Image (cartoon, rainbow, N blue to C red):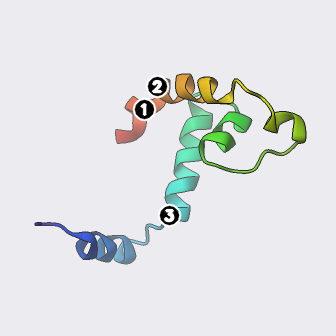
Amino acid sequence: MVNGYDYYAKIIRYNRICAKTIRKWHLNLMIKEGVTEGLADFIQGRAPATVGSAHNLNKVQQSKEAYRKIVGNFGV
């Protein structure tokens, strides 16, 4: 393997990129592209803010549709 785990870990460490930063960027990208905040939280695995939003059976389908719309923008 040319570029293994240690190689990428070193790049991430020295360029000050961490999982928290990537998660914030991803959330901002989704919201910028019109994904609702509740749906973006669901996609990222955050706990729902209210009990009612936890029982929305259509969230999985909605998140699939929203993700299809924005997946092309990840290379930005």
Choose the circle earlier in sequence order: 3 or 2: 3
Q: Are marks 1 and 2 in contact (CB under 8 Å)?
A: yes
Residues packed near mark 3 inside 10 Å, few (<14), some (14 to 19) or many (20 plus): few
Label 1 Cα neighbours within 10 Å, binned few <14 / some 14-19 / many ≥20: few
75 or 64, which is in the foreground? 64
**Where residue 17 sits in the image (x, y, percent)?**
43, 67
Q: Amino acid at mark 1?
A: Val
Q: Secondary structure at mark 1?
A: helix
Residue identified by numbered label 3: 19
Report, in whole angstroms, how far the alpha carbon at label 1 lies from the one at label 3.
19 Å
Quarter of the figure with residue 24? bottom right
Above or below residue 5? Residue 26 is above
For badge 2, the amino acid type reads: Arg
What residue do we see at 88% from left, 42% from top?
Answer: 50
**Image marks 1 and 3: residues in contact by CB distance under 8 Å:** no
Q: Quadrant of the N terminus?
A: bottom left
Q: Are marks 3 and 2 in contact (CB under 8 Å)?
A: no
Q: For the residues marked 1 and 2, what is the alpha-carbon distance in whole angstroms?
A: 6 Å
Q: Is residue 55 left or right of residue 27?
A: right
The residue under label 1 is 71
Image coordinates of residue 23 in percent, x first then y, are 55, 54
Q: Dot 2 corresponds to which residue?
A: 68
Is 24 left or right of 38, judged from the image as shown? left
Image quadrant assignment for residue 32: top right
